[in-house]
Image: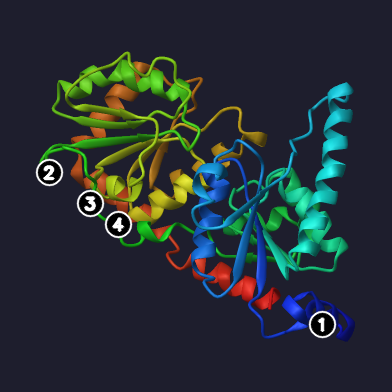
Amino acid sequence: MLTEKQNLDRQAASPEGNPSAPRRLLIAASGTGGHLFPALALAEQLPDYQIEWLGVPNRLEKDLVPAKYALNTIAVEGFQQRFGLGTLKIIGKFAKAIGSCRELLKRGKFNGVFTTGGYIAAPAIIAARSLNLPVILHESNAIPGKVTRFFGPWCQTVAVGFESTTKLLPGCQTVYTNTPVRSQFLAPEKHDLPIPDDVPLIVVIGGSQGAVAVNKFIRQSAKSWFDNGIWVVHQTGENDPDVANLQHPHYFPMPFYNNMAGLLQRADLVISRAGAGSLTELAVMGKPTILIPYPFAAEDHQTYNAKIFVDSGAALVFKQSELTLEILEKQVLSLLESPEKLQQMSEAALSLAVKDSAERLAKLVRQFVE
């Protein structure tokens, strides 16, 4: 419950002190699709809010955000593991970022902040709370990140993508919302690739950054799949030096594909990293999946994400360090030769989906940023 003074402060912060003016929300989400796509899905549910974005230069948000929302950028980065001269520079940038966020919030007369975590969340949270503005934080991973664990208690609420995450956030007010997906995943259109309707299709996704190690496995395994009439669409990311090494009429490599919802609708099997955003989309689409968690993810959180899907029967998981070409080739062929198994995995994936997650999250924002 807000005090009388806080209510007066927030009314004064609205345009011309008018409490009936549209609420202004700053969304702090940066870097990867896992941070950006859930925030974009939330924003779609708040058409009556005036929304601006906080990001960093030269990250994915520069391509995805400006067409819809004003993008503000600050220079900030994660802390290094060992203390040194580089750490001091990062601390200096961090302090400057807090000041920039505070000035932006005051100048823009924002009523609150929503963030999906990551290192951009820290200066946004500190700045907002120093101005008595509410903050809603969404944590999509099963294992919450350091920023979420440290700054979660500063926020009005922490929305979580997995119910089990709540017990890992003592001192936080948590609400289970799952992770929002963009509206196109709820009513997907058909893809536009020249793939016959009657052939088995594998879709490979490495997340918005791609996955070079997974890409190598796919290219080396693909011949055995082609020999069995299987087609492959391979989202390679933009940083794969060997992207042109495989050419085949049944193989479609591309750095990024805009209509991923339509493509996943057509897929018989997906091979993927285990980022929370990708997993949520796969659950909503009901897709059987082979997961290869990114082994260097912070605190191995992708392995914990994957375990929830494996335990439900929606996916198979393989550590990258233990995966071999023979295992991957045989597992794919075995699954595609077993429609019953694929159907069971599909139903298990759908059981994990929360299709109104964006609406749940928007309701929280409306509760605190009013």
In the rendered image, which quarter contains the N terminus? Answer: bottom right
Per the rendering, the mark at residue 197 is: 2
Label 4 Cα crowd, 10 Å radius (few <14 / some 14-19 / many 20+)? some
Q: Are marks 4 and 3 in contact (CB under 8 Å)?
A: yes
**Which type of secondary structure does the marked residue at label 3 adopt?**
loop
Q: Amino acid at mark 2?
A: Asp
Q: Is residue 220 visible?
A: yes
Q: Nearer the viewer, mark 1 or mark 2?
A: 1
Could you tell which of marks 3 and 2 lies nearer the N-terminus?
3
For marks 4 and 3, give the CA distance.
Answer: 7 Å
Q: Earlier in the sequence, mark 1 or mark 2?
A: 1
Pointer 4: what residue? 188
The structure residue drawn at horizontal position 56% and vertical position 41%, both measured from the top left corner, is 32
**SS type, badge 4:** loop
Q: Gap between marks 4 and 1, in whole Å?
A: 42 Å
Query: Cβ–Cβ below 8 Å for labels 1 and 2?
Result: no
What residue type is disc 4 on? Pro
Query: Residue 114: x percent and y percent?
Result: 66, 61
Please state which of the two labelled residues, at mark 4 or mark 2, is closer to the viewer.
Answer: 4
Kind of element beneath mark 1: helix
Q: Position of residue 47 (x, y in %)?
A: 52, 72
Tell me the residue that label 3 is attached to. 190
- Single out the residue that lies furthest toward the front: 16
Say which element carries label 2: loop
Q: Residue at x 74, y 35 (%)?
A: 78
